[in-house]
Amino acid sequence: NYKDYPGQYTQVTVGFVAKKFALRKGYLAPVGRYIILGCYYQYAVDKFAQTKGVNNNNGSAVSSISHKKATVHFGGVTVGTGRNFVVAKRMILDLGFTLNIAPVPHLAFDDNSRIGVYRDVVLRNIFQIHLGIGALAF
């Protein structure tokens, strides 16, 4: 039964980013606007079920379910911008967004479902908004 097979999507992302702040004198913590440059690697596994209509001998339609698993590995470049704010003299609020640019998929995949999973992963992660909250130690 299709309802007995829930889909499962798992993704792990590792990245290295650098933030470049405009030079401002007189502040203990970096505040103001910044740009983000970096790179990332993603590993994604998508388990899903596909249904296909099949006609049996007496002409009635029967649904056939096939379980699939697709794994993709890829990396890309991250660019973005943001701004740090000091709130109540002790907290830092970080608000920004990133654009993740991935290369064109390798077309030698052995399964067409991998290309679909690759496209889904790239589209899910192409634009990200983040909000960070921190505290000043001193």
Image (spheres, grey):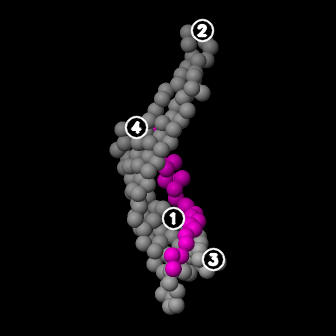
Q: CA distance from mark 1 to mark 3?
A: 27 Å
Q: CA distance from mark 1 to mark 4?
A: 28 Å
Q: Amino acid under label 4?
A: Asp
Q: CA distance from mark 4 to mark 2?
A: 33 Å
Please identify, in this view, whether the residue under mark 1 or under mark 3 is nearer the observer: 3
The magenta stretch is: 112-138
Please identify, in this view, whether the residue under mark 4 or under mark 3 is nearer the observer: 3
Inspect the magenta stretch and tell me whether residue 118 lies in it.
Answer: yes
Q: How many marks?
A: 4
* Residue name at image x 48 percent, y 44 percent: 10
Q: Amino acid under label 2?
A: Asn
Mark 4 crowd level (few <14, some 14–19, many ≥20, 10 Å Cα): few
Picture quarter containing residue 13?
bottom left
Q: CA distance from mark 3 to mark 2?
A: 72 Å
User: Mark 1 — residue?
Assistant: 99
Q: Earlier in the sequence, mark 3 or mark 2?
A: 2
> Residue 73 location, x and y as percent?
38, 49
User: Mark 4 — residue?
Assistant: 111
Q: Regarding mark 1 in the picture, which secondary structure is present there?
A: strand
Mark 1 crowd level (few <14, some 14–19, many ≥20, 10 Å Cα): some
Mark 2 crowd level (few <14, some 14–19, many ≥20, 10 Å Cα): few
* Residue name at image x 52 percent, y 56 percent: 125
Please identify, in this view, whether the residue under mark 1 or under mark 2 is nearer the observer: 1
Which circle marks residue 58 in the picture? 2
Q: Earlier in the sequence, mark 1 or mark 2?
A: 2
Please say whether residue 52 is visible from this viewpoint: no
Q: Earlier in the sequence, mark 1 or mark 4?
A: 1
Q: Earlier in the sequence, mark 1 or mark 3?
A: 3
> Residue 21 location, x and y as percent?
48, 81
User: Mark 3 — residue?
Assistant: 87
Which residue is farthest bottom? 25
Compared with residue 29, is residue 57 higher up or lower down, i.e. above or below? above
